[in-house]
Image (cartoon, rainbow, N blue to C red):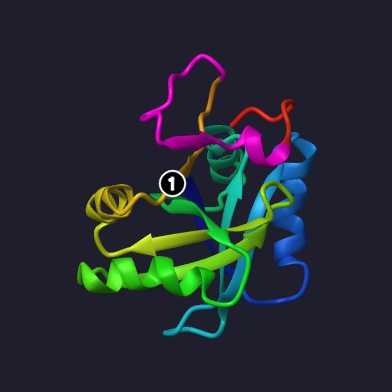
Amino acid sequence: MQQISIELENRPGQLARMLGFLAESQVEIRALTVGHTARDTEKGLVKMIVNQVDRAVAILREKSIEAKVEEVLVTPVEDHAGGLHAILKILAEADLNIEHMYTFVSRVEGKALSVFTCNDAPRARQVLRSAGVRLVSAHQTADRSPDSQEELEITEYWGHDVTW
């Protein structure tokens, strides 16, 4: 799955302005986290998952907002004490470092979804799959085939009318 990262001026209205551009273009936000960068509190750091990555990036760049696309891993996590720990332990034992993470809740299967940025995403993907952890996959068009049968279509989490 892909995540868009954006640095914005950390002042009132900048996030609303940027999200307005996406809303006007019918780009839907599925997950969002906002903070400031460690090196500069004058800049806000926005990370988000949207339903149309390429379109969102094009719209933002058209508005002179630089957007970086990066691969993230999204996995269902048992929604109980220790659920997230089980996944993190697998990555730690493989000496993989979590660089950024956030979780959002899904009402399907009673599980939350966690989004990870790792220092070696392809290896982390392989390590998690080898441990039997399912990954959620986002597809930009309906005719793209899944990377693996082990990956879940995101529509299983948000309904049949969502195309990722």
Q: Is residue 155 above or below residue 127?
A: above
Task: From the top left corner, tell me how far across and down residue 33 is, in percent.
Answer: 61, 66
Q: Which residues are magenta?
A: 142-158
Task: From the top left corner, tell me how far across and down residue 12 is, in percent.
Answer: 76, 74
Report whether 154 appears left or right of 69.
right
Residue lying at the far top of the rendered structure: 143
Residue occupying the point 63% across, 56% down: 111
Q: How many marks?
A: 1
Residue occupying the point 75% across, 57% down: 17
Q: Check if residue 155 falls in the magenta segment.
A: yes
Task: From the top left corner, tell me how far across and down residue 16 is, in percent.
Answer: 77, 60
Within 10 Å of disc 1 (Cα), the crowding (few <14, some 14-19, many 20+) is: some
Report whether 150 appears left or right of 37.
left
Report whether 16 appears left or right of 115.
right
Residue occupying the point 54% across, 41% down: 57
Q: Is 94 in front, or is 73?
A: 94
Q: Circle 1 sits on which residue?
A: 134
Q: Check if residue 104 falls in the magenta segment.
A: no
Residue occupying the point 30% across, 67% down: 91
Secondary structure type for disc 1: loop
Q: Is residue 126 above or below residue 93?
A: above
Q: Is residue 128 above or below residue 33?
A: above
Report whether 66 appears left or right of 63.
left
Instruction: Give the residue type that dot 1 points to.
Output: Arg
Q: Is 14 in front, or is 145?
A: 145
Task: From the top left corner, tell me how far across and down residue 61 is, in percent.
Answer: 54, 44
